[in-house]
């Protein structure tokens, strides 16, 4: 490593932003993938991978991805919940596929517009 | 790699001793097995301060706190939490017997009231990676100082901040720096005191273990302000992990060009040498420490010439404590105004006018939650002991809190509303010291505790001056006599006289403060001393020689059925009685070791 400059400090900070947002638990949005037994059987693992791929490809540094237990609606699995910090109500999306995840990122995450076709309910959601 | 979860495994001394590195390996193995290694990352951090419940791990971003982990718990944790998203209750912190577990670290009382400045990165970064320190804003205070501020500007900011030494004396850092800056001479040194000799203290160790670069950056800024290019860290020999991290950190800083010549393209140069402590408590004293770095015996010298004028190798030298240095970058970054908004008093015109910022304490003794806590100055002792510490163990009653390390003083229960403040603590006969805080309950005897502290300081006296060497010995003899029933009321006055003599005529602060525990216990707990010397009893039953052990024959025979345990445990063959029948103690033979009391399961043995 050559001597670093003040600009390099900034660069290192920018590169690690996502890591630190996650460690400090302070993101702009939180996506919860429901991974109960039923969710996993319905393909929640692939949904998790798809979500993480979107985050990485779009170089999003302020999105928290987490998982939680069964949401109690096994027939509609796999499901995710999206919460934006500035929006009071979390949104639950049902019957997810990697393609639908892409759409949700395009619209809900990037433009703060809910994808109504896949949304189950906008309301109280318990996450850890 | 986009990870979704970070497992922050504590790798401080306490947790490592409890096998946290094995926990880390087990996680890595299990994650690989469950094909989660690309989603979940395992990070090792410095000490979280809650070592008593280690090994500790925090799952981020959820902030779930797990404690007392075992290697065999890991598969379940991965399955439940990381695959199914169900945090596992049985590994969480439970505040009290009938209370539910608390999932999140920030909701646990121990962490809730803390305010982190010196320890701001603890648990959040891997201390062995300079990039992570930089990611949290590290070295930008140095950049700011070097490119936007003059040395005088830096000095001024530190002066205005009201920062005072965290190593014991509470001397205003800005004043020390300014004096040093004014002394002429090309060769000048800055030193970090990481000798931490107080028994039970580990604030400095913890800061170095969790954030070594904060100390390095602080020293760099100080060196710039004082025109020094040579630094030393004098680190306690018994701190292998801290030493290793410090070596790694200075190595990385050198690689990054943050130590060495032309730092950030300016003509400022600075580097740090690491020296290992000589192992004596007195070596933490400034002049003894410098003698020790020079390779001479670690003995204090008279301070009619200050070390800022003639210190290491007779050159101007500024010595500050680890925690003091760690505060510096934050003050430069956020400004003196921010720093003075935390704490007590007013330091605008008088650098001694208040206590600003935070202080790290090592909270130990009879509290429920023991550990390392960083709290804002001005918080009351009561809040630390009862809110953060969770109160007294086993529902007992607090007797006193002893602050300031072995030469600090006792503060009685009636004064627990006292705020944490250099001058308030000194006024009542104790001190901030380096941040020791030992809580004692009704089962502790203050005479016995005073004896314990004095035994430590007496043994650590370097012996150079007579009052400290002989005076403390004489005081210890008297205390010993009192605890075995040979004390008189005149002894109490003699103790006070000797204390004052040692305080006034010792060369260094070791002798100057060693009598504090004796003086304060005499002041606030004279009744307890009087019971010892008049009635030859110890109200707390801690001075064994004053106890009379007897067996309640009725209870022994009917409840314990003469179980014979006490008889077998007695080293003096002082217990008589047939098995299955009542036992009794021959007082002539009993040497009061207390063994029988400890082994009797039926509470048939009484102490009077
Ligand atoms: C016997 C004795 C032991 C000391 N041990 C330490 C120590 O372990 N660490 C420390 O920082 N200061 C210790 N000090 C205080 C130092 O002499 C010095 O005041 C301090 O390091 C200055 O730094 P500060 O102004 O940042 O607190 C000790 C003082 C005495 C008299
Ligand atoms: S006061 Fe004690 S420790 Fe200090 S120089 Fe004198 S003898 Fe040594
Ligand atoms: S106190 Fe010790 S010496 Fe005395 S009776 Fe009990 S066991 Fe024996
Ligand atoms: S070493 Fe882990 S909490 Fe202190």
Image (cartoon, rainbow, N blue to C red):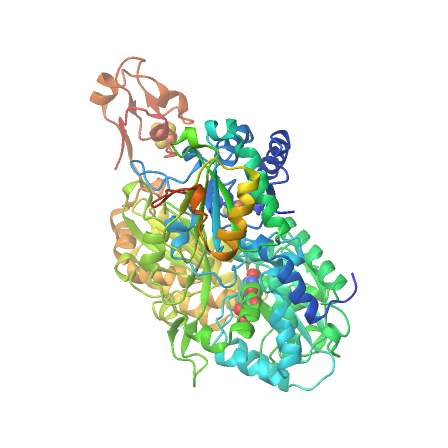
Judged left or right of residue A22, residue B134 is right
Foreground residue among A19 and B98: A19
Foreground residue among B407 and B246: B246
Foreground residue among B422 and A24: A24
Instruction: Answer with the quarter of the image where residue B410 lies.
Output: bottom left
Instruction: Answer with the quarter of the image where residue B312 lies.
Output: bottom right
B489 over B191 or under it: above or below: above
Residue B31 in sight here? yes
Rendered location of residue B90, percent (x, y): 42, 33
Judged left or right of residue B290, residue B441 is left
Which quarter holds ligand 3? top left
Q: How many marks?
A: 0
Rendered location of residue B486, percent (x, y): 34, 49
Residue farthest along the left direction in this orientation? B554
- In which quadrant of the rendered image does the C terminus of chain B lie? top left
Residue at 39% x, 32% y is: A73
Instruction: Answer with the quarter of the image where residue A5 lies.
Output: bottom right
A45 over B252 or under it: above or below: above
Judged left or right of residue B490, residue B185 is right
Rendered location of residue B525, percent (x, y): 29, 57
Foreground residue among B452 and B165: B165
Judged left or right of residue B173, residue B278 is right
Residue farthest along the front direction in this orientation? A117
Residue at 56% x, 34% y is: A45
Residue B6 in sight here? no
Residue at 70% x, 65% y is: B293
Rendered location of residue B489, percent (x, y): 29, 57
B58 over B285 or under it: above or below: above
């Amino acid at each position: 490593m050559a001597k670093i400059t003040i600009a390099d400090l900034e660069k290192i900070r920018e590169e690690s932003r996502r890591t630190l947002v996650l460690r400090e638990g302070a993101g702009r949005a939180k996506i919860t993938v429901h991974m109960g037994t039923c969710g996993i059987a319905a393909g929640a693992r692939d949904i998790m991978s798809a979500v993480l791929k979107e985050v990485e490809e779009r170089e999003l540094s302020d999105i928290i991805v987490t998982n939680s237990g069964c949401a109690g609606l096994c027939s509609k699995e796999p499901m995710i919940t999206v919460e934006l910090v500035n929006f009071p109500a979390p949104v639950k999306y049902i019957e997810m596929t990697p393609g639908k995840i892409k759409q949700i990122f395009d619209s809900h995450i990037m433009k703060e517009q809910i994808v109504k076709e896949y949304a189950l309910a906008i309301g109280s959601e318990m996450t850890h | 790699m986009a990870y979704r979860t970070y497992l922050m495994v504590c790798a401080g001394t306490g947790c490592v001793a409890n096998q946290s590195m094995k926990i880390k390996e087990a996680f890595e193995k299990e994650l690989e097995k469950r094909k989660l290694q690309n989603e979940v990352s395992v990070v090792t951090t410095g000490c979280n301060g809650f070592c008593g419940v280690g090994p500790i791990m925090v799952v981020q971003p959820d902030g779930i706190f797990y404690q007392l982990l075992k290697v065999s718990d890991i598969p379940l944790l991965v399955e439940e939490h990381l695959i199914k998203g169900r945090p596992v209750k049985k590994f969480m912190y439970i505040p009290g017997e009938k209370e539910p577990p608390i999932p999140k670290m920030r909701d646990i009382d121990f962490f809730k009231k803390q305010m982190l400045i010196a320890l701001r990165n603890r648990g959040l970064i891997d201390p062995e990676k300079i990039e992570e320190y930089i990611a949290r804003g590290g070295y930008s205070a140095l950049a700011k100082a070097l490119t936007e501020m003059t040395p005088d500007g830096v000095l001024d900011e530190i002066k205005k901040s009201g920062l005072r030494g965290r190593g014991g004396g509470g001397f205003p850092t800005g004043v020390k720096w300014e004096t040093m800056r004014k002394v002429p001479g090309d060769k000048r040194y800055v030193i970090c005191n990481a000798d931490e000799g107080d028994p039970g203290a580990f604030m400095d160790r913890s800061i170095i273990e969790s954030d070594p670069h904060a100390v390095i950056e602080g020293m760099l800024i100080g060196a710039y302000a004082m025109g020094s290019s040579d630094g030393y860290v004098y680190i306690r020999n018994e701190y292998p992990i801290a030493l290793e991290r410090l070596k790694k950190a200075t190595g990385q800083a050198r690689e990054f060009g943050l130590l060495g010549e032309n730092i950030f393209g300016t003509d400022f140069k600075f580097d740090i040498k690491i020296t290992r402590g000589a192992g004596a408590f007195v070596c933490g004293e400034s002049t003894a420490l410098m003698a020790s770095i020079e390779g001479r015996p670690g003995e204090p010298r008279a301070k009619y010439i200050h070390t800022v004028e003639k210190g290491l190798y007779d050159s101007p030298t500024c010595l500050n404590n680890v925690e003091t240095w760690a505060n510096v970058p934050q003050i430069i970054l956020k400004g003196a105004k921010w720093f003075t908004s935390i704490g007590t008093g007013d330091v605008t015109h008088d650098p001694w006018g208040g206590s600003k910022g935070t202080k790290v304490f090592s909270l130990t003794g009879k509290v429920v939650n023991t550990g390392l806590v960083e709290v804002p100055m001005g918080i009351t002792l009561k809040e630390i002991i009862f809110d953060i510490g969770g109160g007294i163990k086993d529902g007992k009653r607090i007797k006193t809190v002893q602050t300031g390390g072995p030469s600090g003083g006792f503060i009685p229960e009636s004064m627990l509303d006292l705020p944490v403040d250099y001058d308030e603590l000194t006024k009542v006969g104790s001190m901030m010291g380096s941040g020791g805080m030992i809580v004692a309950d009704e089962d502790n005897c203050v005479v016995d505790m005073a004896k314990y502290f004095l035994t430590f300081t007496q043994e650590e006296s370097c012996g150079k001056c007579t009052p400290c060497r002989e005076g403390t010995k004489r005081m210890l003899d008297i205390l010993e006599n009192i605890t075995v029933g040979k004390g008189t009321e005149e002894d109490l006055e003699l103790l006070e006289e000797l204390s004052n003599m040692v305080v006034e005529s010792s060369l260094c602060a070791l002798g100057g403060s060693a009598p504090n525990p004796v003086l304060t216990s005499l002041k606030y707990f004279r009744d307890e001393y009087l019971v010892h010397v008049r009635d030859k009893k110890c109200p707390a039953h801690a001075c064994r020689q004053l106890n009379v052990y007897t067996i309640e024959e009725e209870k022994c025979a009917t409840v314990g059925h003469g179980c014979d345990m006490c008889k077998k445990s007695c080293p003096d063959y002082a217990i008589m009685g047939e098995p299955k029948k009542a036992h009794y103690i021959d007082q002539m033979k009993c040497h009061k070791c207390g063994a029988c009391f400890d082994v009797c399961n039926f509470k048939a043995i009484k102490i009077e």
